[in-house]
Amino acid sequence: MNEISELLKPFEAISLKEMDRVKLMNRMDTKFAFTTADLSRILPLLIAHYRVLTIEGTNTPHYESLYFDDEKFSFFKDHHNGKGDRFKVRIRKYVESNIFFLEIKHKIKGRTDKTRIATNQFNEVLPESDLAFVQGELNSNKNLVPTMWNSFQRITLVSKTETERLTLDFNILFEKDGVKKAFNQLVIAELKQEDLNRNSAFYQLMKTMQIRPYRLSKYCLGSVEIYGEDKLKFNRFKKKLLYLKKINHDPI
């Protein structure tokens, strides 16, 4: 992805500390999906509107995640069934910084509320303090088990004028017990805003390129690819999955 790094050079840089004003832990999310070739065309069109997050000298840092669910895959099923009040639980490693967070994403009434605490490593069995945090946020005592590993690289762009962040994830890989699925041609973009603003420079660019918003989490995408129909029912996701596989140039 040297080409991507080159395309990011004209962007003004922004540090993690400077980015504090757009933490957006409670926000509206809008997702888009397109190819890595599209990304190369899109980035130069965003230079005037966004700054790029630079961490430890890189603007395409690596992320690794370990997702949790219960044995019934309740989090997955809640998303699949369109439940308006649902959760995702993961440990995320910010690789270049070597920092780990236990993170909970709570989707409620169309908004995403994200909470997190620092943790020390990828604990497949959560220590007591981490478990207490999770149970407190979920308001339940679910018996959580690790269900999937995920890794990717991310470009984070911060609007120069709006309270808005744009993440662009690529080199996406899912893995569990030796089963792997790579999405090397796919880019998942997520526009994070205080409130939905369709006048955003990126939103308007997507409209011009006729790339429509879509709804599907990386967790659900990876779960389907790793576990398949033998383990999970995902009828409502099939159209979206075909769309993402087409972008990834997978045989349909």
Image: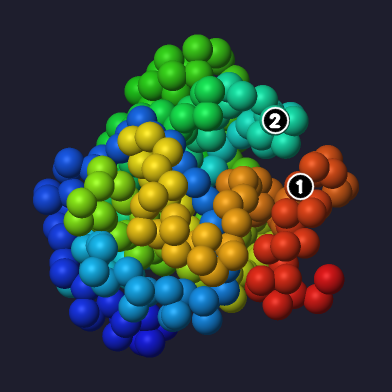
Where is residue 57 drawn, in percent x and y? 18, 72
Decide if residue 105 is in sight here: yes
Where is residue 62 drawn, in percent x and y? 37, 64
In the picture provided, is 108 more to the left or to the right than 19? right
- Between 162 and 227, the one lying in front of the other is 162
- Between 203 and 141, the one lying in front of the other is 203
The color scheme shown is rainbow
In the picture as drawn, the residue positioned furthest to the right comes out as 230
Residue under circle 2? 82
The amino acid type of the residue labelled 2 equals Gly
Decide if residue 103 is in sight here: no
Residue under circle 1? 237
- Residue under the image location 26 percent in, 43 percent down: 163
For residue 120, which quarter of the picture?
top left
- At mark 1, the secondary structure is helix
Residue 119 sits above or below residue 38 on the image:
above
Query: How crowded is the residue under tag 2: few (<14 C-alpha within 10 Å), some, or many (20+)?
Result: few
State how far apart marks 1 and 2 are (Cα). Answer: 11 Å
Where is residue 208 drawn, in percent x and y? 51, 66
Of pointers 1 and 2, the one earlier in the residue sequence: 2
Q: Are marks 1 and 2 in contact (CB under 8 Å)?
A: no
- Between 57 and 243, the one lying in front of the other is 243
Residue 65 sits above or below residue 248 on the image:
above
- Between 210 and 5, the one lying in front of the other is 210
